[in-house]
Amino acid sequence: MTKKPRAAVDPAAKISAANPIRSPQMKQADVRPFLESLAAAHPNPQSDLEFSSPYTLLVAVALSAQTTDAAVNKATRGLFAEASTPEAMVALGVEAVGRHIRTIGLWQGKARNVVALSALLIEKHGGEVPHDRAALEALPGVGRKTANVVLNVAFGESAMAVDTHIFRLGNRTGLAPGKNVREVEDGLTRRIPADMLRDAHHWLILHGRYVCKARTPECWRCVGAAWCRMKSKSVPSPQ
């Protein structure tokens, strides 16, 4: 019996189970200068995922759940060389897609979802990625976070995709404390100035990935430390 693709379960929804430090809320007057400091460190923010179209972006983001962007890029280079359109992906099939992505986490389910979402794009949307949240979230393996990334990166919307890094930063810095992903997303959307909201998605991810790390935040080299509300800043380990 052929297994049906599982319904989308956004991995970000599980983040709240391991709630990070929740600092007092950052003053609204400090939000812009804090983000300006991150912007100065990353003046041309871009996704670390490799893609060439809204479709390849959608697939790459769907594959990135519980996996690093670097691992996804290694897997998709060969995959997209063979199938960079929904039609080609459906023709490639689940088994062949699986051979390309078996180095990433949860690859069996992801392979099924990639082929299924590609088939649904052909059936419902003429092979194009829809510029619509509800339509995106109706695709197999696509949750709110993935939809937000596509809306932000592919279509230029000021959507805030909350991954583990942004959830941690929202709480740790006090930018938008919340006990679950949706609370942090809503807080960020409400508190970040409209002209900064689209790029803030990238600034926060990059800052969380390379500076404000999960285990040991490198506060001593944080450009936004002056506005961060975390009480005990970390210091470098003695050499």
Image: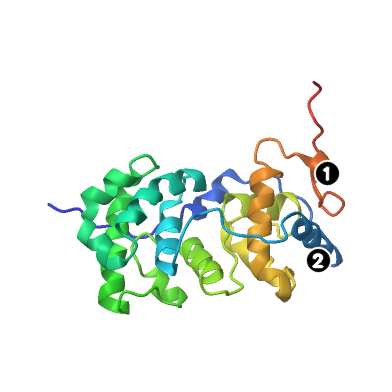
- How far apart in space, not on screen, are marks 2 and 1 (Cα)? 20 Å
Q: Which mark is residue 32?
A: 2
Quadrant in which the C terminus appears:
top right
Q: Quadrant of residue 27?
A: bottom right
Residue 68 is at least partly visible in this image? no
Amino acid marked by disc 1: Lys
Give SS at disc 1.
Answer: loop
Residue at image mark 1: 231
**In the foreground, 68 or 142:** 68
Amino acid marked by disc 2: Arg
In the picture, measured across the screen, residue 151 lies left or right of residue 194, that is left
Single out the mark in the foreground, 2 or 1: 2
As displayed, is residue 86 above or below residue 222?
Answer: below
Q: Please state the horizontal and vertical placement of residue 138, each as a whole percent of the image.
A: 36, 70
Residue 238 is at least partly visible in this image? yes
Which residue is painted at 80% across and 42% down in the image? Answer: 221
**In the foreground, 226 or 55:** 55
**In the foreground, 156 or 175:** 156
Sequence order check, earlier mark of 2 and 1:
2
As displayed, is residue 67 above or below residue 44?
Answer: above
Which residue is painted at 27% across and 54% down in the image? Answer: 112
Q: Quadrant of residue 158?
A: bottom right
In the picture, measured across the screen, residue 101 lies left or right of residue 12, that is left
